[in-house]
Image (cartoon, helix red, strand yellow):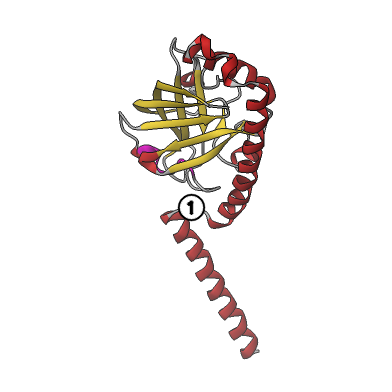
Amino acid sequence: MRRFLTIVSTALITGGIVVLADVGVTLAWEEPVSSIYATIQQQRAEGELDDLEASFLEDHPLPDVQDLGNRRAARRLANEFEPEIATGQAIGRIEVPAIDVDAVVVQGTDDATLQKGPGHYPDTGLPGQRMTMGIAGHRTTYLAPFRNINELQSGDEVILRMPYGEFTYEVEKTEIVEPTEVDIVRDVGHERVVLTACHPLYSAAERYAVFGRLTEIELTQG
């Protein structure tokens, strides 16, 4: 009996240490189990994005729209790209140098999609469409791409690399809003990106939002 109790107590202590270690890692960085899953999903998304870019550029070569000028050409390409994407599919890449973000963006913001990476709000525009593009991301799980979103400041860059071009935005402001304030991704008469994530850390009580205005377009050379 004593041996049995010793085994049980040892198992409980070991289990407690593992739980505490997991909590510690999550507090310091991100939840480890979901991160492994998200890493695999991001690798798959990379392959999807490479294939999508190759096929899109083959069917929509840049010379066909060069005479329109960058903004008009980008708009036409974005409009032609939109019907080719589906929920859960990789659509582009987001880079935010100030907080070390470099991730594939997927279409949609449902739970399953956000486990793969930052997700594009499907009711918002795409880069080049002269609309607002909304992107949501996790802060503590599934690689936590937007963990440090609250560190972004005015002037920081947000870069979106789409199969048809690279779009650079400059952060203008940040806000903490209620989850019900969906109008933060409304169109405002100029092209912009809005990044959102739960706030504060380990809570979904509010949303942290970052607003960036388009400053530069560079079309992809097919």
Quick check: is 44 in the magenta stretch? Answer: no
> Residue 10 or 141: which is nearer the viewer?
141
Q: Which residue is mark 1?
A: 30
**Left-right relation of 59 to 10:** right
Percent position of residue 109, x then y: 60, 32
Visible residue check, residue 205: no
Q: Which part of the image, by quadrant, shows the N terminus?
A: bottom right
Instruction: Tell me if residue 218 comes above or below residue 34 in the rendering.
Output: above
Q: Residue at x 67, y 36 (%)?
A: 51
Q: Which part of the image, by quadrant, shows the C terminus?
A: top right
> Residue 128 or 202: which is nearer the viewer?
128
Q: In this picture, which residue range is highlighted in magenta?
A: 145-150
| Residue found at the far bottom of this picture | 2
**Residue 208 figure quarter:** top left
Visible residue check, residue 133: yes
At mark 1, the secondary structure is loop
Q: Amino acid at mark 1?
A: Glu
Q: Residue at x 51, y 18 (%)?
A: 128
Q: Residue at x 37, y 38 (%)?
A: 150
Percent position of residue 69, x then y: 48, 12
**Left-right relation of 98 to 221:** left
Quick check: is 149 in the magenta stretch? Answer: yes
**Left-right relation of 40 to 159:** right
Percent position of residue 36, x then y: 59, 55
> Residue 138 or 165: which is nearer the viewer?
165
Q: How many marks?
A: 1
Mark 1: give few (<14), some (14-19) or many (20+) Cα within 10 Å: many
